Amino acid sequence: MDWTRTQAVIRRSVPVAAARRTTLAAVLAGTLAAGLLAGASQARGETAGPVRAACPDELAGRADCYTGQDANGAYYALAVPTDWNGSLVVHAHGGPDLGAESDPARSLDDLGRWSVMVKEGYAWAGSSYRRGGYGTRMAAADTESARRVFVGAFGRPRRTFVHGQSWGGDVAAKVVERYGRRGGAYDGALLTNGVLGGGSRGYDYRVDLRVVHQYYCGNHPRPSEPQYPLWQGLRAGSTMTSAGLRARLQECTGYASAPAERTALQQRNLDDILAVTGIPERTLESHLRFATFTFRDIVHERLGGRNPFGNRGVRYSGSHDDAALNAGVERFSPDPTAVRDLSYDSDLTGRVGVPVLTLHAIDDPTAFVEHEAAYRDTLRGAGRDRFLVQSFTREHEHSALSDAEYATSVTALDAWVRTGRRPTPRSLAASCEEFDRTYGTGCFYDPAFRPAPYASRVEPRPGGLRWPAMTAAQERAWSRVEGVGIAP
């Protein structure tokens, strides 16, 4: 049955509220029937459609949830609230996770974490992506696939928004550029705590952490172990674990110990590493983990051993002896083809044609708030900054923000799309209090805040002051190169 056509006919013939109830009842009946056939379909090795599943506890009794696996092997989760407003939020998750296969639990976990969207009446679709590891375009394609699965089962929503947090912000921004042109599949985007500097520049501070840590600690690798260039993150065949990495960081800096329990050398090493890199102490281990295991994935698994990173010419400062640090730190230059492929996969052109609202914690310890300056300059460089509104909160976490603020943001984005009236940081702050009466998680907007340029936080590499990092013309030219980018 063509659910898109059925939904359109229903909406023309009955009032809106009745249309929602009638459409949802028809869909549920069809999906339940599909669920009875799912076992036989999967036994034949076919990809079944959405099947009813238990909702996360946060949505028990408030929505109907479904799971499935798309043709590319990506698991997904869908949710339709009992009071569906007819619109859809498509979620792009962060990471990237590093498992070899799609994680069937990830999309359901994310549905629980962002259940506020469903509580506000929006249907939900989220993909776990077809595999772990880096691949922004792959993740964007899988996000779009989840939307298509939803449309195939429930019909085309009135409006469709894409949401992404962390690396998912980069993925969602890529979704907007690829599928969200005016009149396309998406009507707007909400990017929260997004890694919006792109892959070719957005990880330079972790490159700096990797080399500065090794200068002071000399234990990753140790002199007695096989040596490798630090831009690899980790040699391909290494069996190092996260626990092993933590032990080496503790050995050198005592980061997990109380200050009184650290040796004088540990404290000086820790002070120097933090001062030079600007990384907060509370996320030092997680950043080093990314600069180890995710760099290994990018270099060895996605770029065939080629180096996309460089630090030649970077002047490190803030240590107790900057001259010695700059003389002794490992230096390297990137492979231009590796930079091209990482840039094509993950950098943003700024060519957007629908409203984009961002929300970022000023004290985000993982995706620094200066990523927002990079995104602002990217859209400005593309002549599209009229589509962008940015908001900031005095929060201190990366992986989650206040539910009241998420509700404020998605409602404001919806109104912007419907009416054409742009929200402002002040209007967002003013409207949040109403949502906080429901969620009680607080409103922390700072309407006066503006992030400093990206180069104020991360020492720019050659060409690093120009935005966008990849122009639309470069993207078109590179798209004609056989094998360009990162394979799905």
Image (cartoon, helix red, strand yellow):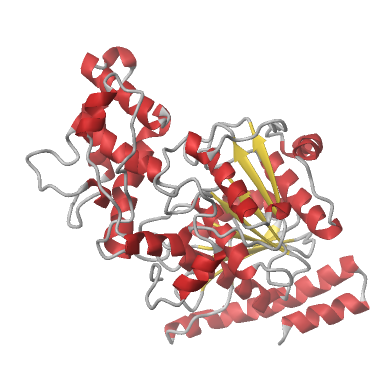
Residue positioned most to the top: 260
Q: Residue at x 72, y 55 (%)?
A: 387
Rendering coords of residue 295 (x, y %): 32, 52
Count of picture labels: 0
Q: Which residue lies furthest to the left in this view?
A: 224
Q: Tell me residue 318's x, y (percent).
A: 36, 23
Q: Image point 84% across, 51% down: which residue?
A: 421
Which quadrant would residue 384 be assigned to in this image? bottom right
Q: Is residue 191 left or right of residue 475?
A: right
Q: Can you say which quadrant of the picture contains the N terminus?
A: bottom right
**Position of residue 463 measured from the top left corner of the image (x, y, whole percent):** 44, 49
Tell me where residue 427 appears, x and y as whole percent: 81, 39
Q: Which of 140 and 119 is in front in this view?
A: 140
Q: Is residue 171 visible?
A: yes
- Residue 133 appears anywhere in the view: no
Left or right of 326? Residue 172 is: right
Where's the C terminus, which quadrant? bottom left
In the depicted view, which residue is nearer to us: 470 or 235? 470
Q: Is residue 324 left or right of residue 357?
A: left
